[in-house]
Amino acid sequence: MEAPKEIFLKDYKQPDYYFDTLDLKFALGEESTIVASKIAVNPRVEGQSSPLVLDGRDLKLQSVKINGNPLKEEDFHVDSRHLTLKSPPSSKFTLEIVTEIYPQKNTSLEGLYKSSGNFCTQCEAEGFRKITFYQDRPDIMAKYTCRIEADKSLYPVLLSNGNLIEQGDLEEGKHFTLWEDPFKKPSYLFALVAGQLESRDDTFTTCSGRKVSLRIWTPAQDLPKTEHAMYSLKAAMKWDEEVFGREYDLDLFNIVAVPDFNMGAMENKSLNIFNSKLVLASPETATDADYAAILGVIGHEYFHNWTGNRVTCRDWFQLSLKEGLTVFRDQEFSSDLGSRPVKRIADVSKLRMYQFPQDAGPMAHPVRPHSYIKMDNFYTVYEKGAEVVRMYKTLLGSQGFRKGTDLYFERHDGQAVTCEDFFAAMRDANNADFANFLLWYSQAGTPVVKVTTNYNTEGRTFSLKFSQEVPPTPGQSAKEPMFIPVAVGLLDSSGKDMPLSSVHHDGKLESFASSGQNVYTTVLRVTKKEEEFVFNDVSERPTPSILRGFSAPIRLESDLTDSDLLFLLAHDSDEFNRWEAGQVLARKLMLSLVADFQQNKALVLNPQFLQGIKSILTDSSLDKEFIAKAITLPGIGEIMDMMTVADPDAVHAVRTFIRKQLASELKQELLITANNNRSSGAYEFDHNNMARRALKNIALAYLGSLEDPEITELLLNEYRNATNMTDQFAALVAIDQQPAIREEILADFYNKWQDDYLVVNKWLALQAMSDMPGNVENVKKLLNHTAFDLRNPNKVYSLIGGFCGSPVNFHRKDGSGYKFLGELVVKLDKMNPQVASRMVSAFSRWKRYDETRQSLAKEQLEMILSTEGLSENVFEIASKSLAA
């Protein structure tokens, strides 16, 4: 097969033609759909003519006209990817194109497609070219109108972007709506929905007194589950006004929930389209995690109205400009509405679980990639991009950061811009010196920072010596030192924060006394390969709390002893670092026990670690959700990531041993914790209740590892008496560790919830992720279960994605897990390349394992790459993985 084309940032060129307006007309049909477009074209340089190349995929061209005149065949060229107008006018002109498309056959879920009988769209990143021929790139911003015609009985609701300006009935039982979006937008933000839907309606009054109609559309039976989504939307609108000064700009805001969707949600202007799992919730069917995800993602998509829609990206290499910034905004929103430390811990855990391993593998790329084959494969810039934005706030403070965003919106409203434009707004608004900060956008890899400490008793000084290194990544062997903000505090021997006097660095003295208030945390700017910071007037040897709040996305190594870490775990005022001290101890313990296991030595749990967990578990002064996080062990993937040769069997055995030992030694404390945090009251989604449930359920998860009749009975009672899905599913997860009752209760759960597809997806994922021996055979059987459908992304992510998350069974030594995934990737790729590429990513770090596993994984990658007609999405990840 011909290798797909790679696209490079350095090759970016301004378009020769801009589009001022686009009028679309859709005639939706049962066999096919006719799309007519009318474009006002404006040459960038008046009087110059060059070929106009329009993108188009899977389109049947019916006609093309310029200024009302049909073009002759010799005036244009059509191939499988483009429509090229050979010699268009050199001044403004009108271009009209009519195409025929087949949404019913569109299983890729990009462009216009059918979902459960309704029409809907997904155009980011390059789906609009599957609707009509167009310059499908984000720097082409135009004002749109959209007329939709359809059978009124089949599609009573017809929605698009902007304001509804006309609607009415037509002949033959059809009707129409006409929508106008007064704001310029790129093609990826176009949206259309048509179908049998009903809406939950509400209003929001903006800070300037304008009343906005809010509507959340779903099939009628799902409408009762949209109450939390509406609450989340109104909370997001209010928060964005208060924190960022951003007011909504239209009179209508629509959200539509669809069950077949490749991603989580899409921020199309005024018509957000959501994966159902991120809209629908009731206490009986959704967990606390689901409720929190809905709050965050509804916030995220709404926040895009300014960070993505009003100010958009010049090209897809700048994706972090909208996504990194908007993820940061949704993280802050969720933090303000919940527990900031717990949210920070969750976000960093996610970063380490997904982004750090990618940054150390064949798909490593900077926050702004230098090249791509398929942009869909680079959406992991979200999380690291958010950390880059967070560093601006860490360096500038809340007020300085707000000044920077205000200037960014003031300068660039209505424009398609670059990462440098955001950087410049932050710098210029604060007259700041950011030295080599832009390297965060251009250098891939996770910096490794090593810190050594020294206390000088006579001089009463305490020094921190930093050295940094960014490991080589594909295409970037030599790296420059990064600009790394490191937030630091010092603890005295009683565990209290010490007031900081001054710090000496690079021949300069920075004093903290001038503010008139005690300073307990300062941000050190580490910008060189090696440098030292010396704190003055330090009355006793302190215990340093380094990288508070995870102030930079780095791997930190320090000379802190286990005693230091236990001290921080007990006393640090920075809750993130308190949690992190426990995690560092746990990682060290697990790696040490893995070495023992590999040498067939008896495994022994460090009593100090046990005592540390016990003291956290029984500390009534701590936030309960923080306790739940603090007593959770690092995941298997995180430990394997620290090994030279990853050994999934050894890490699994060690993690299981520690869990059982903790459960056995702390059985009474865990039982008391479970009993004290039980509640029979009505479900409430608030921090206190979520924290109580989280702590009770982590206690049950530990207890579930014990083969003990008393515990089995306890878990069955928890399962049967649960009044909400959070508690019932947590009990089911604990029961999943109990072979004697596992099958019976899994069957009971399915029988109870088989008519709710979102709950059934949890049931599929739980079984797929099981570490039960030989689980690959069980997962194969589930492929043929009535609850599974390979065409539905959520079900694929639950079952197949879930299976890839089981290190024991996916990495089985006989290669059966790899073979299972390889065959499914090929099958999936013919239906939905985006979903297939997400699945093939599980192979990307195959060289991290032993030679036997490497050989078996390589065999599957070679088989996938030899497949005829492989998509660009899968080719890019499979080929880069194999070449690593």
Image (cartoon, rainbow, N blue to C red):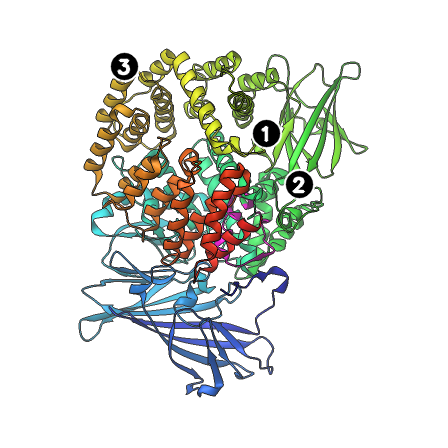
For badge 3, the amino acid type reads: Glu
Residues at marks 2 and 3 touching, judged by CB atoms closer than 8 Å: no
- Which of these two is toward me, 402 or 287? 287
Q: Which residues are magenta?
A: 364-385
Question: Which residue type carries mark 2?
Answer: Val
Q: Nearer the viewer, residue 608 or 807?
A: 807
Q: Residues within 10 Å of mark 3 (few under 14, many from 20)?
A: few
Mark 3 sits on what residue? 710
Examine the image and state in which quarter residue 805 appears: top left
Q: State the image coordinates of residue 397 (x, y, percent, origin top left).
A: 61, 38
Residue ID at (69%, 36%): 468
Q: Residues within 10 Å of mark 1 (few under 14, many from 20)?
A: many
Look at 51% across and 33% down and name the residue there: 638
Q: Contact, CB < 8 Å: mark 1 with mark 3?
A: no
Question: Is 537 on the left-hand or right-hand side of 15?
Answer: right
Q: CA distance from mark 1 to mark 2?
A: 21 Å
Q: Which residue is mark 2?
A: 470
| Image depth: mark 1 or mark 3 in front | 3
